[in-house]
Amino acid sequence: MIRHLRPFDPHRIRLLIFDLDGTLVDSRLDLIHSVNATLRHIGRPELDGDTIASYVGDGAPCSSSACSAKNPTKRSCAKP
């Protein structure tokens, strides 16, 4: 339920921004569960939660490639 202190017309909203990087929502556990579910689906072993969490902030492509590497490390996606 959305609470607001002054009346507004929701049809006048032109932009809605979601900030899910940990500032408003702690999504760490959701990311860990999602990554491990994906790894199970493709037949790979699950990763430790701290390992997965260490990839947060590197961007989705880097995190995805690091998590799916045969021997995932923080450097699996290091830029030259």
Image (tube, rainbow, N blue to C red):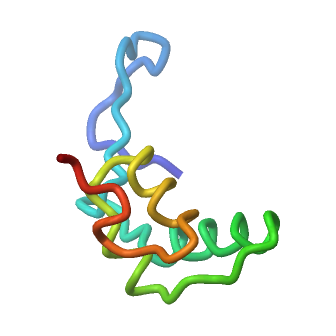
The answer to whether 18 is drawn above or below residue 1 in the figure is: above
At a point 46% along the width and 21% down the height, the residue shown is 10
Image quadrant assignment for residue 27: bottom left
Image quadrant assignment for residue 22: bottom left
Closest to the observer: 45 or 52? Answer: 45
Residue at far front of view: 80
The answer to whether 29 appears left or right of 24 in the picture is: right
Residue at far left of view: 80
Count every numbered label the image shows and give the total.
Answer: 0
The answer to whether 49 is drawn above or below residue 32 in the figure is: below
At a point 31% along the width and 71% down the height, the residue shown is 74
- Residue 20: give x, y in percent of width and height: 37, 52
At a point 42% along the width and 47% down the height, the residue shown is 60
The answer to whether 13 appears left or right of 38 in the picture is: left
- Residue 36: give x, y in percent of width and height: 65, 75
At a point 38% along the width and 86% down the height, the residue shown is 50
Image quadrant assignment for residue 56: bottom left
The answer to whether 17 appears left or right of 44 in the picture is: left
- Residue 29: give x, y in percent of width and height: 50, 78
- Residue 57: give x, y in percent of width and height: 26, 57
The answer to whether 41 is drawn above or below residue 52 in the figure is: above
